[in-house]
Amino acid sequence: MAEMNNIVSGANIHISDQRKIVSVSNGSNCETLTSGGDENMVDNIKEAGGWFAEHCPIWPGQAHYIKVEKVLFEGKSKYQRMMVFLSSGYGKVFVLDGALQLTEKDECSYQEMMTHLPLCSIPAPNKVLLIGGGDGGILREISRHNSVHHIDICEIDTVLIDVYKEFFPDIAIGYDDPRVTLNVQDGTAFLKSVPNGTYDAIIVDAFDPIRPEHELLDSPFFKLAAKALRPGGVMCIQAESLWYQPFDIKQLISSFRHIFKGSISYAWTIVPTYPRHVSTPFLCVDFWGTIRSYNCV
């Protein structure tokens, strides 16, 4: 077995065939990762003639295909299934529970939009919280802001972090910044322990409002996030494409406006490998009017 080190959580990952993780050890603890059962992503690729296929009932009449050159990793933590493969057109690709998360070629579009929109919308942010974002890309972008002195990240799955560190080092480089503190904890539980007014900005990369398993909108999560922001602070969250008709953007804006008591701004950026090819962050603040104006040439 090959042993891979230099992993953010200090664990050793053992791989039996350069594709499947069979165990992760961290000090006295050892977590066994299963491969098989419902973990059939590689078998699906074989059946599709060497193509990764993403199907979902929330995109009726549509499927997304990417040509697979080589499967680099397949494994399952206690929380989710993961796969990394080398594609013919987008470099390495990360798949989570069968859904494409990012590719080397176009990840910058999502990471930069989710980071620089909120951090440039308020003057000199000092303390930033990232919930989710285990790949480290948003951390990488936050670290470009010299005014930021402290960055908390709350990510519950350390195996996911380890896999990104091994296969996507240019993205996970964000963990190397000394300003970063990793909190291995559920986001809601973490926010409950945070004093009011702690953060200048909160970025949420752990919420997909069109997936039924994500019920944060009906939980105390966003009320806790609003309390954790200082007056005049900003929260950024990935929403969903305006082209996805069943998704009620107006209702989501109304809900956020009720929670944050201020303006809700809706933005978008192109991510070619995403369904509908669009990613759309919301900026939520506790005041009304223009967040910040820029003269672009």
Image: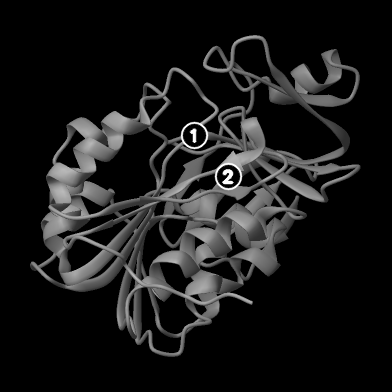
Residue 41 percent coordinates (x, y): 69, 24
Instruction: Assign the C terminus to one quadrant of the image.
Output: bottom right
Residue drawn 45% across and 90% down?
Answer: 146
Image-based side of 237 in relation to 140, left or right: left
Q: Which residue is mark 1?
A: 80
Image-based side of 179 in relation to 69, left or right: left
- Please say whether residue 136 is visible from this viewpoint: no
Image-based side of 102 in relation to 235, left or right: right
Q: Which mark is residue 172?
A: none
Q: Nearer the viewer, mark 1 or mark 2?
A: 1
Q: Which mark is residue 23?
A: 2
Residue drawn 53% across and 82% down?
Answer: 144
As shown in the figure, which amino acid type bears the numbered disc 2? Ser
Image-based side of 240 in relation to 84, left or right: left
Residue 128 percent coordinates (x, y): 32, 72
Residue drawn 71% across and 56% down?
Answer: 167
Circle 2 packing at 10 Å, graded few (<14), some (14-19), many (20+), is some
Task: Examine the rendered structure and indicate whether residue 162 appears above or below residue 294.
Answer: above
Residue drawn 35% across and 52% down?
Answer: 265
Residue 105 percent coordinates (x, y): 77, 54
Front residue of 98 and 220: 220
Residue 18 percent coordinates (x, y): 79, 45
